[in-house]
Image: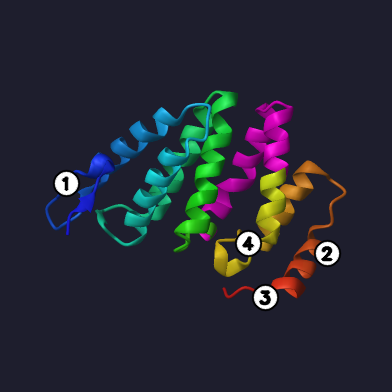
């Protein structure tokens, strides 16, 4: 069946699903509406669209493409608009899963740190809380790879022992499947 667009409309591309560029344009448009506040409805809508990508409903679109769009938008965003994009990435990892934690693992350290450095005390506190929640998440529930979480911690505190953190996470949750 054709992919469901925002607002309930359906759009079919030859071969089924929404065409890649139309999807990216629509995703960026909706993302731009979020602005400074992590609007739950927008985050849910964009998370569902990411799920469509994971299911193969968007012709020519891969989760890597979506990751690139989110990363470029976050890096170009004003300081007060970055945190909602991090929250969106978290929602996709937790609710869709489907490889997104592995895909987001590559850019997430630099994106997290860019958001942290440019944020005020409220943003930094929110990011620290999010990082603590990520460390409590089981791998099968959309967790980032343990070494990635450890690297974020080390960027925040150069004395942080990443190897010890990874060992503790593996003891707590087991070694994740490759």
In this figure, which residue is indicated by the disc labeled 4?
145
At 76% from the left and 74% from the top, the residue drawn is: 171
In this figure, which residue is indicated by the disc labeled 2?
164
Q: Which mark is residue 11?
A: 1
Q: In the figure, 74 relative to 170: above or below?
A: above
At 66% from the left and 55% from the top, the residue drawn is: 134
Seen from the viewer's position, the closer of residues 85 and 154 is 85
Image location of residue 45, percent across then percent down: 37, 44
Specify whether residue 116 is in view: yes
Instruction: Name the residue at the front extreme.
Output: 41
Mark 2–mark 1 Cα distance, whole angstroms, equals 49 Å
Specify whether residue 103 is in view: no
Mark 2–mark 3 Cα distance, whole angstroms, equals 14 Å
Image location of residue 141, percent across then percent down: 56, 65
User: Few, some or many C-alpha atoms within 10 Å of disc 2 (few <14, some 14-19, many ≥20)?
Assistant: few
Quick one: label 4 or label 2, which is nearer the N terminus? Answer: 4
Q: Which mark is residue 120?
A: none
Q: In the figure, 12 relative to 81: above or below?
A: below
**Mark 3, secondary structure of its residue:** loop
Marks 3, 1: nearer the viewer:
1
**Mark 2, secondary structure of its residue:** helix
Q: Are marks 4 and 2 in contact (CB under 8 Å)?
A: no
Instruction: Name the residue at the left extreme.
Output: 14
Mark 3–mark 1 Cα distance, whole angstroms, equals 42 Å
Q: Which residues are magenta?
A: 102-128
């Amino acid at each position: 069946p054709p992919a469901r667009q925002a607002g309930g409309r359906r759009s079919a591309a030859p071969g089924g699903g929404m065409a890649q560029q139309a999807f990216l344009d629509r995703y960026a448009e909706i993302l731009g509406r979020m602005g400074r506040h992590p609007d739950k409805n927008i985050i849910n809508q964009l998370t569902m669209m990411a799920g469509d990508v994971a299911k193969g409903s968007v012709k020519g679109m891969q989760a890597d493409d979506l990751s690139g769009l989110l990363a470029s938008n976050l890096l170009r965003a004003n300081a007060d608009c970055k945190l909602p994009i991090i929250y969106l990435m978290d929602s996709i990892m937790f609710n869709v899963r489907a490889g997104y934690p592995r895909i987001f693992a590559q850019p997430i350290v630099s994106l997290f740190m860019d958001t942290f450095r440019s944020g005020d005390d409220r943003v930094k506190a929110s990011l620290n809380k999010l990082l603590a929640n990520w460390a409590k998440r089981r791998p099968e529930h959309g967790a980032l790879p343990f070494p990635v979480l450890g690297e974020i911690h080390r960027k925040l505190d150069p004395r942080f022992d990443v190897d010890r953190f990874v060992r503790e996470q593996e003891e707590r949750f087991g070694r994740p499947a490759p």
